[in-house]
Amino acid sequence: MVDNDDRLSRVFGALADPTRRDMVARLAAGDATVGELAAPYDVSLQAVSKHLKVLEEAGLVRRSKDAQRRPVHLDAEVFDLMTKWIEKYQQRAEERYRRLDQVLARMQGQDSPATDTQQQRAEGAAG
Amino acid sequence: MTTHTTPETLIEADPDVPTVRMVREFDAPRELVFRAHVEPDLVKQWMGPDSIGMDIDVWDIRTGGGYRYTATREGEAVAHFYGAVHRVDENEKIVQTFGFEEMPDAVSLDTLVFVELPGGRTRLEALSVVYDFESRAGMLASGMEVGVNEGYAALDRVLAGLAEERA
């Protein structure tokens, strides 16, 4: 469990840097070589390689071994996973606040358990 | 990173600072939303998940106060939560720390703001600040027994795939 926490931390840590986020955004559009990634920035290839190493260690990008250009590839699956974690957190918060909705309804003397009406109201508000 | 898939609670994990922001609106006047955070009998009814009981030892939500409770499952204690209440502006704001004994180094500073909306509605804005991004990752991941394990399993698969490719 600690190891997994470390891995997730690495993902968040890797994305804490604006240049690395930029590189990830770039890679989302398609694979690119180190040179291509370095072009928009006023930094050395070494600096870009360093950033790439952090992203690689976090499991966010991969570099193909054999191809001569060694293009960098974004691993979108990891992003889906992170989104999922935040979604789970969001779901738990929402479940808690739906219970609070019911407490508030009782406090106002609307004794309806009314999960259905709350759902409808929620959908109405979202639309 | 923002997600807003289910209709109501908005969650934001800021990319630049280690915070988590939550925003939720309630169809009740702000005095009631505030009371539901302050009165232990009301708090008990909504804060813990259905499968988890909440034994409140101290619930003293005022400037200089504090709180402490035990989360229980089938009568067994599963975690002990506590915090210091830094400041309370009645009906408007609660500033407090949040931590649990099982991870004594993890603490967040939570600011809850109760905003009055037209039509007797209330918007609750909660901002949690933690020490660093690692702490936030732990915070997002903690306490979701089922979800976390699924997440770990999925992460394991992803990482195993990456390791294989590297080998």
Image: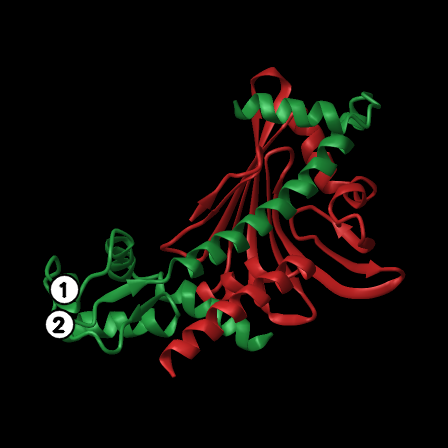
Chain colours: A green, B red
Label 1: chain letter: A
Q: Quadrant of residue A42?
A: bottom left
Residue B19 placement, left or right of B29: left
> Which secondary structure lies at badge 2?
helix
Which residue occupies 62% across, 45% down? A91
- Please state the horizontal and vertical placement of residue A100, each as a whole percent of the image: 72, 36
Q: Amino acid at mark 2?
A: Leu
Residue A54 vertical position relative to residue B94 in the rendered view, above or below: below
Would you say the residues marked 1 and 2 are in contact, meaning their CB atoms lie under 8 Å apart? Answer: yes
**Which of A59/B16 is in front?**
A59
Q: Residue at x 45, y 72 (%)?
A: B161
Q: As drawn, is A74 to the left or to the right of A50?
A: right
The type of residue carrying mark 1 is Ala
Q: Quadrant of the N terminus of chain A?
A: bottom right
Helix, strand or loop under label 1: helix
Count of residue discs: 2
Residue B44 — which label?
A: none
- Residue B118 higher or lower than B106, as above or below: above
Is residue B132 in view? no
Provide the residue designation for mark 1.
A38
Mark 1 surroundings within 10 Å by alpha-carbon count, few (fewer than 14), some (14 through 19), many (20 or more): some
Q: Position of residue A126 (x, y in %)?
A: 54, 26
Residue underneath mark 2: A45
Q: Residue at x 54, y 77 (%)?
A: A3
Q: Residues within 10 Å of mark 2 (few under 14, many from 20)?
A: some
Left or right side of B62 for B16: left
Could you tell me which chain the residue with mark 2 belongs to? A
